[in-house]
Amino acid sequence: MHLIKGYWLVAIGILVGVAGGYLYWQQIGCVSGTCPITSSPVNSSLYGGMMGGLLFSMFKKNKN
């Protein structure tokens, strides 16, 4: 439970990023299929989740 309390903001960022990556693939995507990230919904969602988690982790406060 302590782990969830400590990283809830990062988890929300991952979920937002996955949704954003999937929407990017669906709306814009890659027509030719040669783009390594946006040619597949799985790759696009994973990349979006990683970027969302990193972005939201910037706003986490340190307990130092």
Image (spheres, rainbow, N blue to C red):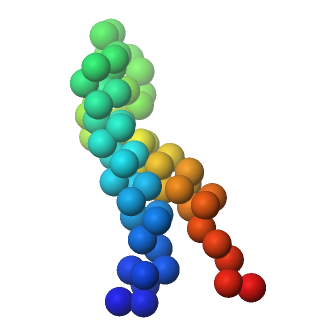
Q: Is 32 in front, or is 57?
A: 57
Q: On the image, which quarter does residue 41 sit in?
A: top left
**Residue 9 placement, left or right of 18:** right
User: Residue at coordinates 63% horizontally, 58% vertically from top-left?
Assistant: 58
Q: Position of residue 3 (x, y in %)?
A: 43, 84
In the displayed structure image, the side of residue 13 where residue 54 appears, left or right: right
In this view, the residue in front, 30 or 16, is: 16
Q: Is residue 63 above or below residue 27?
A: below
Give the image location of residue 5, x and y in percent: 43, 81
Please tell me which residue is depicted at 34% across the width and 54% down the height of the picture: 15
Res. 13 image quadrant: bottom left
Check the image and name the residue furthest to the bottom: 2
Residue occupying the far right of the picture: 64
Can residue 46 be seen here? The reply is no
Q: Is residue 36 left or right of residue 27?
A: right
Q: Who's the residue at 50% across and 46% down the image? A: 51
**Between 45 and 16, the one nearer to me in the picture:** 16
Image coordinates of residue 62 in percent, x first then y, are: 68, 77
Say if 14 sits above or below 64 in the image. Answer: above
Task: Give the total of numbered labels.
Answer: 0
Relative height, residue 19 to residue 26 (above, below): below
Q: Nearer the viewer, residue 21 or 63?
A: 63
Quadrant that contains the C terminus: bottom right
Furthest residue toward top: 32
Give residue 21's quadrant in the image: top left
Q: Quadrant of the N terminus?
A: bottom left
Q: Position of residue 34 (x, y in %)?
A: 38, 17
Camera sees residue 49: yes
